[in-house]
Amino acid sequence: MDDMDKILSLLSERIYEWEEASREAIEAETTFKSYEAAVQKAHMDSGSSAAKAQIETRSSKRWAEYYAGVQRTNLEAEKVKKLISLTQLMFDAERTKQANQRRIV
């Protein structure tokens, strides 16, 4: 397996990792939004206004933990996207290197 094949294999792996990380981010955000809406509705059902219910919800430690978790999953998906870009640059560099070597020979 030459360097181009290795880079293409790595690129394929990273695309798969990005897809998985994106699915996790979607799941985390969906769960979080559902949780947030349910808590706000509970506050409103107990007599709070919509604005007060939102403040009560977002000021809880549990909300902050869920929100931070969603942000971490989004960060992971973005990180893998950056790794994909880096791998594409590696591919371009290797392709240029091989083209230059063909001209020299």
Image: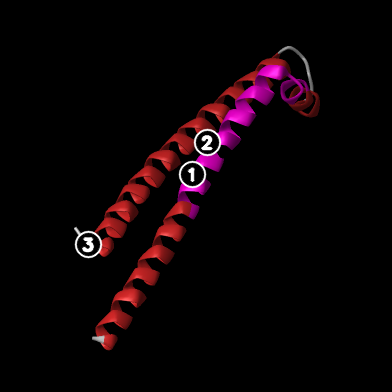
Disc 2 target residue: 73
Real-space CA distance between mark 2 and mark 1, rounded to the nearest whole angstrom: 6 Å
Q: Nearer the viewer, residue 40 or 63?
A: 63
Classified by dominant secondary structure, the portion drawn in magenta counts as helix
Residue 2 circle label: 3
Please tell me whether mark 1 sits on a helix, a strand or a loop: helix
4 lies left or right of 71: left
Residue found 78% across the figure and 18% down from its top: 48
38 lies left or right of 7: right
Which quarter of the figure has residue 11? bottom left
Disc 1 target residue: 77
Q: Amino acid at mark 3?
A: Asp
> What residue span does the magenta drawing correspond to?
56-82
| Magenta-colored stretch includes residue 67 | yes
- How are the colours assigned in the image? secondary structure
Callout 1 environment at 10 Å: few (<14), some (14 to 19), or many (20+)? many
Q: Determine whether 31 is above or below 94 in the image.
A: above
Residue found 36% across the figure and 50% down from its top: 15
Please say if the residues under marks 2 and 1 sit with CB atoms less than 8 Å apart. yes
Real-space CA distance between mark 1 and mark 3, rounded to the nearest whole angstrom: 29 Å
Q: Amino acid at mark 2?
A: Thr
